[in-house]
Amino acid sequence: MCKLSMRIGFINSCAGFPVGIGSSAHAYQSVSGFVKYGHSVNAFRGDYPFALFRKYSPASLIKFVRDTDVLYIRIFNGISQDAYTLLKALRPSSLPVVWEINAPSYEQKTIKRWLTGASWKMLAKLVDASVCVSAELRAYAQEDLGLASSFVVPNGSDPGLFSPAYRDKRIFKGFGNDEFLVLWAGSSQYPWHGIDIILAVAEKMAGINKKIKFLLVTDSAFIRRMHIPGNVTIMPPVPYFSMPGYIASSDLCLCLYNKRAWTKIGFYMSPLKLFDYMSCARPVIATAAGQISRVIRDQENGFLTDNSPQDIIDKILFVYSDKAVASRIGDAARRDIVNFYNWDRCVRQTMMILGAAVHKDLEGLRSQPIFQRGG
């Protein structure tokens, strides 16, 4: 870990308060961790209305650069934010740039995809290192962008915030104590979030076991267009700091994703919901893809599925019928969060990369044990 205090130039348009979707949770946890460990954060993008960092206006751009030891940029949604990489030109030998990569450039729509990809390849020549949330993205950074110093830093959860201690089924009004609640949180507007799989499972389950109910925390504007079985309850998005109670009070959670045909690197995500489910000691049924397959050990700390509705139904019924197994698997999942897949570890890894970029010692990180696990 970098022991000397750094002034981190934080450029992240996803930073915002109140904390909501995964990207803003990631930003919040990162900034909170940097400050906790004694670093100062200079913010040029993002809007946290509390004193976690020092804010700079566009008019004070030169001062922002002068006051910064390392730029930490989440590359995201096109050229406007990514172009801040060019600030390195103002101090080419003393202002390292580290990118946070959460998706490849071709996640964007067709025309924007080409523009973003071309700009990333150009700007990457100025980048000293990248923080990638999965091994798939590290391969992308190295092979497509030419960023040799790329490191895998998987996402995590906050085991103090996301805890089974918040379990209280009264949070779900209208359900009996004998009903088995299956929770999914995600976006119904993105087809790869697996909403179609969940609705197909629910429809079949309605004729098998009426005690099993499905709770979907999602954006209702999109899901209203779909056929909703009678055993499905749609709940509006829940604020980040309230979500632990909802997860902990469910009986089982789903983390399902459809394949994305247009991505050549396969499933590259590091789903925050997976880690939050696990942190609440919930048994999870998750798609066997990418990093998920490396985090979940089938029937040890969760269940992996091929996404076929019957396989998911069988696993739900298995957990429903054996509370002891559900408890054992949930406890094992939480241990993995406490031991590794947590935000504190994520922040410490990121600080090590930022510090190594400042001190021009990135090669020395490769042998560090903390970078040998996960991804």
Image (cartoon, grey):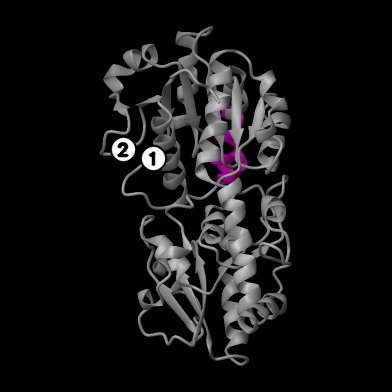
Closer-to-camera residue (138/224): 138
x and y, in percent, of residue 23 in the image: 46, 46
Q: Position of residue 247 (x, y in %)?
A: 47, 66
Circle 2 Cα neighbour tier, 10 Å, few/some/many (<14 / 14–19 / ≥20):
some
Q: Residue at x 70, y 42 (%)?
A: 136
Under circle 1, the secondary element is loop
Q: Where, by quadrant of the figure, is residue 191 drawn?
A: bottom right
Q: Is residue 271 above or below residue 10?
A: below
Camera sees residue 90: yes
Identify the amino acid type marked 1: Ala
Residue 329 part of the magenta-drawn span: no
Q: Considering only vertical position in the picture, is 368 above or below 232?
A: above
* Left or right of 59 on screen, residue 211: right
- The residue at which mark 2 appears reads as 47
Residue 234 position (above or below residue 29): below
Task: Count all numbered tags in the image, as a single digit.
Answer: 2
Which segment did they paint magenta? 104-119
Quarter-of-image position of residue 297: bottom right
* Residue 284 appears in view: no
Front position in the image: 188 or 282: 282
Check disc 2 and give the amino acid type. Answer: Asp
> Label 1, on which residue?
15
Residue 81 appears left or right of 101: left
Left or right position of 360 against 223: right
Q: Earlier in the sequence, mark 2 or mark 1?
A: 1
62, above or below 330, in the image: above
Tag 2–tag 1 contact (CB < 8 Å): yes
Q: Quadrant of the N terminus?
A: top right
Q: Position of residue 81 (x, y in %)?
A: 44, 31
Q: CA distance from mark 2 to mark 1?
A: 6 Å
